[in-house]
Every structure is written in structure tokens, then in C-alpha cells.
Image (tube, coloured by chain):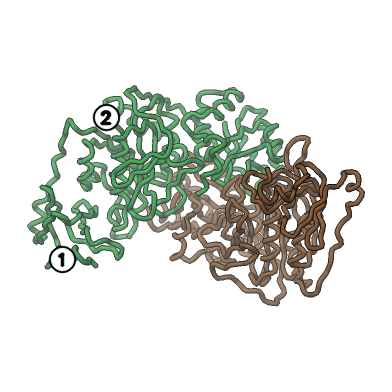
Chain colours: A brown, B green
Amino acid sequence: MYRGKAREFLKGISVGDRVRITKEGRSYEGFLMPRSELGDEKHVVIKLDNGYNIGINIENATIEKIPYERARAKIEERKVSFSKEKPTVTILGTGGTIASKIDYKTGAVHPSFSTEELVNAIPELEDIANIRTNLLFNILSENMTPTHWKEIAKAIAKELNSGVSGIVVAHGTDTLAYTSAALSFMLKNLYKPVVLVGAQRSSDRPSSDASMNLVSSVRVACSDIGEVVVVMHGSTSDDYCLIHRGVKVRKMHSSRRDAFRSINAKPIGEIRENKIKVFQKYRKRKEEEVFVDDKLEEKVALIKIYPGIDKEYFDYVVDNYKGIVIEGTGLGHVPTNLLPSIERAYEEGIPVVMTTQTIYGRVNMNVYSTGRELLARGVIPGEDMLPEVAYVKLMHVLAHFSDLEEIRREMLRNIAGEITERTEVNNFLI
Amino acid sequence: MYRGKAREFLKGISVGDRVRITKEGRSYEGFLMPRSELGDEKHVVIKLDNGYNIGINIENATIEKIPYERARAKIEERKVSFSKEKPTVTILGTGGTIASKIDYKTGAVHPSFSTEELVNAIPELEDIANIRTNLLFNILSENMTPTHWKEIAKAIAKELNSGVSGIVVAHGTDTLAYTSAALSFMLKNLYKPVVLVGAQRSSDRPSSDASMNLVSSVRVACSDIGEVVVVMHGSTSDDYCLIHRGVKVRKMHSSRRDAFRSINAKPIGEIRENKIKVFQKYRKRKEEEVFVDDKLEEKVALIKIYPGIDKEYFDYVVDNYKGIVIEGTGLGHVPTNLLPSIERAYEEGIPVVMTTQTIYGRVNMNVYSTGRELLARGVIPGEDMLPEVAYVKLMHVLAHFSDLEEIRREMLRNIAGEITERTEVNNFLI
């Protein structure tokens, strides 16, 4: 499947052969992999012994075929170097596809690689920064809980306050955006980059986005963006990554590599050919001590509205939770049969925050009678906050305030960029 | 605010004046309205006495200013004509913004206009078809229930079987896509157009989409598309409408006029300058009798998954519902703490269907261990069905089958185009 220059470069070598490629003083050993039809002529792909595939530009490179047994014995871990000229970035591992490989028995993907192995698989990371790694835990992100968010937040603060330039959090993509929202609210006085990154395809697939996402996220961790951001593929090609604000991003496709989209806001910027281009205002890097405010009220429910929803179901939620985020219809509506339960929630001091299941756009509860009836019953309009972000924010706010008016004020206060200016919000339907 | 030719046309007349515009034998009376800055030079806008604004192309038109009192007396309902050469379309009114006006006391929007008044406000409808109207009820669509769906389905079948060419259902936009899904499953042997239409801005705002959406939907109701479809603005300009399949569409913005998007599928087509252009296969018109299968099991719940979701909450749902649709994370996942409850649902004969909160993309429960554990507990993978569509479909299926294997087979059977071919689905992230 190799064409043109790559085919010439590989003369006498076949897919599956053990090879050593030497380039600019570094050498890479592994098995020559087949190349996808869409591949260019400039790169060859080999599978390293740790299971990762890497693509190598053949320019100025030499290749030799080596017998497998001989090669086996020669594998050694590269020494990790430290240079005073380079910034230092800490990669915190939490699990997920970005740190996983395929189980060849079942064909399914398991979290298994340590962050350190990941860094060893992508030597170019060290061209950008001194890399520290710390595997906090190794779980699929659907099992992430508020307790994990706290552990991540504390580890981030500890590292940043020890002087590193920025943090990369390698995370499963399923709930990555919930975690980025949680960190946005929990990390106070943050003026350094905290970059969440994941992968939609595991590293041993030819189409993996793990390597490019990780390289891009380390670059952003060295930048002057002093916020919690998410860095993931910006298109289905390997041409650029987008830098999303941690409270304005959502996974919008189950499998595509460009699944993450900024909602109701432009991305902060993009990173293309190793250069960051900025699209909008952001908080700039400063030398400040970050601290963690990790108090969260966990008895908050996120409820989606649908035709035929039962009053009894909603009553159960009112009876059992201390805060409720509603994913309403349209501009922020629920059926009339729920109004008595919502009124009761207010009387019992339980805040009800309205968001919309349209995902895009702002709630506006002054347009229709339903909205005004909800406002009259104390419902807090969630502006253009994503339902998931309002959920995390309400957990945070409820842990600090108990008076409904204070809770309302805090929910409507733009704490971490989660509320977009009213005049801007309509321009961002993707 | 009128420019160029329109300004010339209006010489001696000011905004707010009572005018009569005569064009091609028809005359329109009302108050001259201001024109938005973006307006062209070819149209003037008047507010009719029924509260609707219409734009009139000034070419070949004449205008006269008339004293208000005199005008008041002259208003009369236009006679509705019937022509054998034209197809007949029935417009069923159900309420919503498309049949609403602003309450100038509170500034809020109320449903208030009858469908007949609406048709009178848009005389060009009669150039396309003989129009019958029937106001079934007049509610905001957040109050739509399965009982309303049944009433709409029966009215559609009665009209179609009486020989009309097609049906337009004027509907609030909040739950329009739930209703279009319900009608798609309930109308059996359907080979004529059933077009759901709404408006994002009420008819007395200059930016209203009501008139163009309604005209486009009547044209589609005369076409050879024998399916349930949704016709709404395709862009933020008034340049075209999209024709969405009723089971593949979702309201994706709270306020934009182009809020409705086909998900995981191309729209069936578009209607631009009164011409329909088709993008993909559809069921063609045939002379057949449609019948209604309106059995629905209403004890179905639609539950969104989020980090920190309680086992107790999910247990409540298992205890109180006969079917559950989960809006899972990513490829179709839930946290491990819910697995025992899901297993119990299966043991108690309660089907659990998995969809994804990413909205776009297909569930695939063979990739990760969590998915395989769910499949082993009898969870039905919802393919690329929208959560809302899977919810309506499960209500329909549960009313006809009680055996879990039969329910699984029906949920995985493509009944009304709700499941897109696996090879196509990744191409449709908007």
C-alpha cells in the first residue's frame, strides 16, 4: 500500500518485517505496518514494541531490516532527559482510550498503558518540553465520579505550584467535558494551562488520534493560555486540533475524531503545524499560586424533559435531591403537569435550574407563558449554559450556599466563562 | 428604513399609515410596517388586520393611503375558492408559535390564531392548492402528550383517506420532532406526504419564518414524497427550507430559524424558490389507504446518564416503568454502579435501550468492556437512533410485544427509516 517515495524508501522490505529507522540521531525499531489508502508518500508507519504505531517522515531517514530475534534483545527504554531551556509539563494519567490498547483476544479496547509508556511511544513530546508523568488512576471515563474530579484537581494544583509550566490530563472522552467543567469551577486563581486531552481511536489503530492530540496538548500546556481547556482533533483529517474552553465544550459524536465541539462560543483557538492561532479572548498566564476549592454537593440530579413525563417521577426527584437541573424543551419549557412539583421544590428550598435539550442556544423564559410561569415558581434560567455544565456548577454552588437567592445569584454569575454574552450566542450553531 | 425603489413606491406614505396595495387583481389592506436594515428594495411589509405581517413585492403593484376609519369598515374575509385543477391540502392546527401572536401588554407570545386565519393571512397558499383547515387543538407543544399524538394521527388518516393530496400539521417547535417520530410509527401503509411545520418567530415579528415555512410545507404536501417529514428553514436567511425525515430530525437550537437539523442522515431534500430538490431516497406517493396503529405503552422513561448518577435513582425507574431508554455516554456506556439495576431490569422483563447523549453517531457496545458488560445484561443497542426517537419507538413496540427477544428484534428493525446504514452514519456531523 506504500506509494511513490515511501515505496522507494522501503525497497526490499515488506509489511510485517522488523525494521530500524534512524533519523536525526534517533532510531526507532518495530514492525512495518500497512498504510491506509489515504496515506501520503512521505511517511512510513511502524508498530513499536510497546504496541503504539508511529509515523516517521522518511526525509533524511535511513532504514534497515533486522532479524526479529536479534531485535528483541536490543530494546531498551530511552533515557528521559532534562533541559533547563525547556518548559516542564506534567501529564496526569486517568485512563481512557488515549492510554489503552486493543485486546487481541476479544478485539475490544482496554485501558492498560501507563502515561510513561505513552510518552516513550511519542519521542517528539520531549522536543517540546521536559515531561513528568503521574498515573493518578486508570479508569474508563464513564466511571469518573466527583471524587475523581477532586483527586485530579488536587494533583493539578500540587504540580502547578511546584513550578511546572502547565498540565495535561489524559482522560477518557465519554465524560471528559464534565471533568473539564468541574476543574474549571474547582481550580481557583488559575493562571496556567490545564489541558484535558483524550483519543477517539486507540493508539494501535492506524487512524489513532492519540499521538497528535497529545503532542498538541503539550504545546498548549506550554502556551500563555491560563485556563482549563480541552484539546482534540478539529477535523477528520490529522491537520489541526481545536482548543476549547473547558466549560463550553461537548462531545458531539460517538466515534468521530473531531467529536468535540465548542457550543455557543468560538473555540479559544487552534493548533496547526505546531502553531497556536487564537480566535478569542482568554485569561493570560501569570505567576500565581492556584488553590483548590473542591466542595461539591453530590445530591444534584440532571433530568431530561420529554412528552408524557410523569409528575410522580419528577416528585421522586424533588423528594430525593438537593438541586435539580432540567434539560427542558426549546427556550426552557416543561409540560404544565410538572408545575406543582416545581413550585414545591422552590418552597422546600431546592433550586431548579433550566437548560435546554436543543444543546445550542440560550434559554429565554420571558417569551412564552410556560416560561413565565416557571420563573414565577423560582426556576433559575440557565442562560446558555450546557446542561452538563449547569449540573456541575450547581453541585459547586450548592456546596457553598443554601439560600435560594444566593444560589440564583451564583448560578447567573459568570464564574469560569460558562455564560456567553447574549449578543454573541446565536452565531455558533455548527 | 425603506430604500431605493421601495422608497419611491412609498412616496407620500409613512410607516404606520393605513394603506391598500393592489397587485394582480388582489388587494391587501393594513398598516405600513418598518423594514429591517437587511431588507431589500423590492418588498414592502404591511400588518394585516388579523395581526400578521406580509411582505409584498412592489413590482406591478399600486398603493394608496386610506383613512383608518374608512378602512376599518371595509375589511371582509376573502372568499375561499376551490379549483379542480389544483391538489387539495389539509392544514391541521395544533397550536404553537406558527399560530400565535405577541400579547402587546406583556410582550410575550400566546397561541391565539386559528389555522384558518393563518391561511387568510398568506393568500399565496391558495395559488398552490385548495386549502382545507381544521384546528384540532391549540396548545404550546411542551404540553403535547401521547394522547394528542393519537388524535393527530386519526385526523391525518381521515383526511388522507377522504382523498386530499397531503397533510400539513402546524405544530409548536419544542416537541415537534417527538410528534413527527410518533406519527412515523403510528401511520401504517402511508404513501402520501404528512408535513410537520412550525415557526421559531411569531408571525407579527418582521423576522418571522411562519409564512415561508407554511408555504413550503404546502408545496411539499403536494409533492410525491409519501412519508412523514418536517419542513423548516434551512438557513438563517429566507432562502430555502429543508425537508427532514420525521425520525431523523431534532431541534438543535433554542431560537434560530434554522434550528431543525437532520441527524445521522442527509435531509430528504430542500425547497428553494418553490422548487423541490431531492438529496436521497424516499418513499414515493401511491394511492393507498393509510391506517392508524395508535397503541402506545406510556410507562416508558428516558434517562440521561451523568457522572455521579445514583443507583437508587435508576432503581426507582426500574421499579416504576415498563421500558427504559438510556441516553448513555460515548458509544453507549453507563457507570459500573448501575450494572446491577440494569441486570435486574432484564430479569424483570423490562427492556433497556441504549442511545447516546453525543446526539450524533452510532452506539457501538462491542468496543469497550463497559459496552460488552451491558450487552451481556440484555441491553438493546439503539444503533444510531436519536434518544427521543428510541423513546417513542419503545412506547410503540412495547404496546405490541411483551417478550424481550421480540422487543429487541423490533427495536433493531428499521420501521420508518429511523436507523441509518452503518456505512453512512459517520458523514453527517453538521
Q: Position of residue A294 (x, y in %)?
A: 70, 63
Residue B107 occupies quadrant:
bottom left
Label 2 SS: loop
Kind of residue at disc 1 = Glu
> What residue did someone put label 2 on?
B164
- What is the number of callouts on the image? 2
Q: Position of residue B190 (x, y in %)?
A: 38, 27
In-front residue for pair A257/A382 = A257
Instruction: Indicate which label's residue lies in the foreground, 2 or 1.
Output: 1
In-front residue for pair A275/B392 = A275
Identify which residue is drawn at 23% across, 32% down: B87
Residue A250 occupies quadrant:
bottom right
Identify which residue is drawn at 10% across, 47% down: B25
Q: Is residue B307 visible?
A: no
Kind of residue at disc 2 = Val
> What residue did someone put label 1 on?
B8
Identify which residue is drawn at 57% across, 46% down: B357
